[in-house]
Amino acid sequence: MRIRRLSAFFWATCIIAFIFILYVVTDLSLKLPSIKPAVQEFDESKWSVFESKLRHIENELTQHDVVVGEIKQVVDQIAEHSQGHHPPQRRPKDEKKSNKLREFKALDDSHIGLHVKFNESSCPIQSVPKAEVQMLSMYERMLFDDKDGGVWKQGWNIEYKEDQWNHKNKLKVFIVPHSHNDPGWIKTFENYYKSQTKAIFHNMVEKLSEGIGRKFIWAEISFLSLWWNSDASDNDKVIFKNLLKSGKLEIVTGGWVMNDESSSHWLSIIQQLTTGHQWLFDNLGYIPKNAWSIDPFGYSSSQPYLLKLAGLENSVIQRVHYRVKKELALNRQLEFKWRQLWDGVGKTEMFTHLMPFYSYDVPHSCGPDPKICCQFDFKRLPGNGVTCPWGIAPRKIIQKNVEERAHLILDQWRKKAQLYRSNVVMFPLGDDFRYDRANEWDNQYGNYEMLIDYINNNDAWNAEVQFGTLEDYFKALHAETKLSDFPVLSGDFFTYADRSQHYWSGYYTSRPFYKNMDRILLAYVRAAEIITAQATSTHSVTYIMSLQLRDRVEQARRMLALFQHHDGITGTSRDEVREDYAKKMLTAIKYSQSAIQQAAYYLLKQPPLIEQTQEDIYFDVDDIWRRHDEIPGRITIALDIVLPSKRLVLYNSLSFKRHEVLTVLVSSPHVEVFDPEGNPIMAQVAPVVAGEKRLGFAANKFLLSFPVTVDALSLTMYTVSLRDNMSINKYTSYTRVRVYNADYWNIELPKMFPVEQPPARLTEDVTVQAGNGTRVVANMNGLLKAIVSSNGGTTPVHMDYVQYDTQKGHDNNSGAYLFIPLGPAQPFKSDAFPEIVITEGIYKSTLYSSLNGPRAAEIVLAISVYDNPSLPQAEVEISNTLLIDPVVDDIELAMRFSTEIKNGDVFYTDLNGMQMTKRRYFEKLPLQANFYPLPAAAYIEDESTRFTLLTSTPLGMAALQPGQIEVMQDRRLSRDDNRGMNQGVLDNVRTRHTFRAIVEHAAAPCPTRPAGAVGGQLSTGAHVSQQLHLHPLVVMQYAAREDAARPAYSRSASAPVDVVLASYRPYVSTKSKNGNAMHGLGMTFQRVYLDNCYGNKDISKWYPVGDGQVQLPELVEVRAEEVFESTLTFVHVGKAVPDGALTLCPMEIRSVFINQTMKHG
């Protein structure tokens, strides 16, 4: 019966298809009746697919056999469903998109199309994943005692039994030669290359082929690229490739740099990782398998997930708190499967090897006794300029001493093996910039070859020793020990301490100007690569121009990638190196701006320009970077009778539609604003408050604020025009102005600004509100005191500034790396009765306060609130523009918020802007140990209220008391902290940080988190604000005739707000499963797991959360059949993505490759 029914249904659909074909051919104006809801009850999902197929037929298909084939596929799916089979769920394909520019307008749900809900039952998300080692639990349990362990100062006296090895169960030792090359630290990147790294490569191709079994590993692709393109001969390149093919040389991690893991944003980490991997693939056809991260100062759990997604299988790390190392070593847990906080099944696990001792140098690598291990670092042989601090020099290995020497180092290897669960031992043989001299290659390899031969030929010792790579080590390890025998670990390794109470929490804040510059550059590089990908994929630019855009963006990307180095963004390089990084970033910003405006011009079909001052510069980007060490300026839109109008081109690089209040500078208060359709809209004009130590009003400059809406990945246009100041003004509103503690000012503002200037000193609180939005209460110094939501709910939030001094004992002071405060923070004491200016308007209101602390710092505080109906939450923007007094030797400045939230000792911070993790304040630890990285966000909460702080700059933070969040702002330190930089931090420049403070309430008491839950989630509102903050609109302007067209570029759909477009990269290379080279575009998405307890539910009306599906053909210009699964760095391509519909589990990151091989031209 079932077959007969299906057969009848099949032929009925064929008849219907025939009618539609007839309709298409004869162009009859037939209309189908709409499907009634009652029909959908049969099987709504399958009818949706069927209805979509018919639409597809109507618009694109002209051949009967294709029609029948597609309808038959639908019937087969229904048949499968009736038999209990559930095929992969997907949304139907929409109509084919045209290349034409679309008129900018708001889109309703009809553009998104019908879809089948994604089944998340297979997703690994769990609030309490299983892990034998959970780092927060370990911190709660550990005493953090610092006992003298003997020769292994931070451990214990290791013992072993000689009979634990035999001829069937030998100790296997892999000696792994390496050279750690910092792309900038004491010298600049280029100077390191010229003076040392170039010689290392030269020696590598000459010496590594000598002898039997020599091996070497290399990590930093930035240096390899420089050598390859500038100094490597054709013969060098052939030898280098052969070394790779033979396995004598392994490239590990393959990133452009060995990135920092505390301050670097995860979007920047994937940029530097992809840049390195793509270079390796394009130039060497090489894909790394193992990761090597021995020098970053603490480790984030985001990194192993990204490495796993990039296709790497194993990882090595080193700089972990000495007491944590001891705890793991005691339980032989130094090798573990590193799992993400949300992963309940182990899908994200990265196998990780943690080095057990103090450092990655030779004295702290062969075993627990550095005095002995140093004797086997043969660069330190007498006469080479490097000695052993323990007073016993290495000896050349000869026949007379080889037995004694071999037994001595074998004893160290055996002791090291007791800390691990297998009989396979790794001995890293290297240090910073090693092997730059030919005689070191000879000394290291020659002496170890004698030791290896002697040990391997002594059967009684039951040991096998060889040179090896990481691949050799991990292959042997996994062959001997099953993965299931290793523990699962979750959490991160912050904050790092290398000895006593020397916690490396100072570098979270060092050189904050450049940390902020990094985030600005990230936003530009990401926007540049996305808009150039759009210009390329839509054929808006010629092939030659697309290559020019590609090269410009690639140069900017490489400079961003370089700064992710663990001595770059950390602020731990010497002054001249820091300046070199900054100049490179400035160039990168300008390259990005150039590419963005040029791509925008062509996407908008080259609108006519009245004036063009420079070839290839069509639009002016409203962000003027004059110097690498100055806060950027803004363009003042100059309007006059000759040029009475300017067009503002807005680019939204986010994958969802954004609604916000935009502010630009204009030269006249007599202006009006027109929307993309040319209709006048309400706008607000305010005077510009300027100044550093003293405030004042800028002449002939005004702030113009108005609401804008920009679709996902779209360009839209607003117009600012000069208004006849004699005409009736219905659309421009002027702010009210209040000036306090400045009765001596002679205020000369245009008369349309109502001004209050009380003569008396301000001694009471003031309030500030924009329209019907959030209201803030500030104290007499202009500091935040309370946040009042639009519905009247008041939350006390007391803001103040504090400062720390440093201890000044021998080898015990703060520096670029370390934070060693003299004691608790002291109040920052500014001059009494600071100048305060308040501008209040319908869209934006701001309080400015000039806080000057003698022999401390100058701070200009700006507190702004907005009336933005799309984001109805109690949110305040706080901007600190500060400069530490150059006469002060040692000061660390922090901003502190105090609330009544009952969070106890629990707070949450983000890891690399990718995820939130739970923290605790520990009284058993020193103050500096309770500071953690703040790359993007932190919050505290109780059952009814949450206080979230978002930051524009990665900084250090702490929650030292219940209800508090404290964020470092800048630090000036006169002393070196003895970690190799050999200088203090005295190059402070005026710096601006912008924060968003958000108060959210629970509709009902939030459910108690399960015991053991260690992850956290931002609310939808906080996530939206964070994305708008990190990726601001790119504002460009040009002059056009008032009657000229208003072009726009827009796609037909947005991604859900919980989906982050991390990367959209044109010109990536990969290979198919059969080995053929492929070229195309790469895209990476993350689906964020958002909290649904706190916050205003109305936000979801403006920013809806999705169900985990992204329809790529609707979002970007791509055909569904071109979309393939891919690794994070696009060097491995998997199967096709059905219908181009990408599905994402919560917290999952997925990449796709869009095949455009042979499509350019």
Image: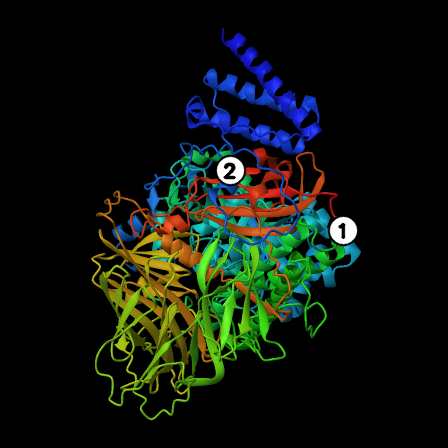
In the visual, does 795 lie left or right of 386?
left
Q: Which mark is residue 114?
A: none
Residue 826 picture location, percent across and down: 26, 77
Name the residue furthest front: 727
Name the residue furthest top: 1
Q: In this orientation, which residue lies closer to the viewer: 797 or 401?
A: 797
**Which three-letter amino acid code belongs to the residue tagged 1?**
Val
Residue 211 picture location, percent across and down: 69, 49
- Label 2 sits on a secondary structure element that is loop
Q: Residue at x 51, y 54 (%)?
A: 654
Residue 680 can be seen, yes or no = yes
**Which three-letter amino acid code belongs to the residue tagged 2?**
Gly
Q: Is residue 846 above or below residue 381?
A: below
Q: Is residue 701 above or below residue 134?
A: below
Eye-nearest disc, 2 or 1: 2
Q: Quadrant of residue 555?
A: bottom right
- Label 1 sits on a secondary structure element that is helix
Residue 448 can be seen, yes or no = no
Number of residues whose C-alpha sits closer than 10 Å to that of mark 1, classed few (under 14), some (14–19) or many (20 or more): few
Dot 2 or dot 1: first in sequence order is 2
Q: In this orientation, which residue lies closer to the viewer: 236 or 714?
A: 714
**Residues at discs 2 and 1 in contact (Cβ within 8 Å):** no
Q: In this orientation, which residue lies closer to the viewer: 296 or 524?
A: 524
Q: Residue at x 51, y 37 (%)?
A: 113
The residues bearing labels 2 and 1 have C-alpha atoms spaced at a distance of 54 Å
Number of residues whose C-alpha sits closer than 10 Å to that of mark 2, classed few (under 14), some (14–19) or many (20 or more): some
Q: Which mark is residue 113?
A: 2
Q: Which mark is residue 238?
A: 1
Tally of numbered discs: 2
Q: Residue at x 47, y 51 (%)?
A: 303
Residue 217 picture location, percent across and down: 60, 52
Residue 64 picture location, percent across and down: 69, 22
